[in-house]
Amino acid sequence: MTNISGSFSANVRVQTILVPQDQPNHELQLAEIHATQKSPDPNWNNSRLTYSSFADLVSGTGTQRGYFLNEHPDGDRDCGTFEGKVTTSGGVTTLEGTFTFASGSGKLTGIRGAGTYKGRLVSPTQIEMTWSGSYETATAAGRAAA
């Protein structure tokens, strides 16, 4: 497995908030974020990220789930899912959870692996995130099995 890490800072491009009114301060949020990854790994550095998430929050705290797509500078792609917790305390909103790779193309064909992420809302529409994990591709797995 290859270890990776990185970060991004992004503005929320699209956000829809529904208020079910079943309890005070309950919100369902659907958001789409676009960013450029920063990573010491040249395979991930400058990848374009699209991240779509759904959050179920009461008073700013709850769960988040979603999907991500990285489009790498060489044209390869990887995508997967994430889930975690959103916590708001003292006016600061943080995000923390896990991600799992689901598929890839080019040199990332057959990608598998997972990792963790931590982030915070800098403003209601700006997010900063760090992440780390590990992965292997079908080619690397085949070499290891040989």
Image: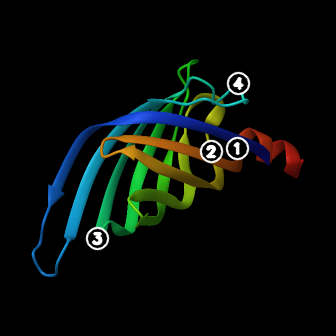
- Disc 1 marks a residue whose amino acid type is Ala
Determine which residue is flagged by label 2: 110
Q: Check whether the beta carbons of the residues at disc 4 and disc 2 lie within 8 A of each other.
A: no
State the image coordinates of residue 131 (x, y, percent, origin top left).
62, 47
Residue under the point 42% across and 34% down: 10
What element does badge 1 sit on?
A: helix
Determine which residue is flagged by label 4: 42
Q: First in sequence: mark 2 or mark 3?
A: 3
What element does badge 2 sit on?
A: loop
**Structural distance between the alpha carbons of marks 2 and 3:** 40 Å
State the image coordinates of residue 15 (x, y, percent, origin top left).
22, 46
- Disc 2 marks a residue whose amino acid type is Gly
Q: First in sequence: mark 4 or mark 2?
A: 4
- Disc 4 marks a residue whose amino acid type is Pro
Tag of residue 59: 3
Determine which residue is flagged by label 1: 138
What element does badge 3 sit on?
A: loop
Q: Check whether the beta carbons of the residues at disc 4 and disc 1 lie within 8 A of each other.
A: no
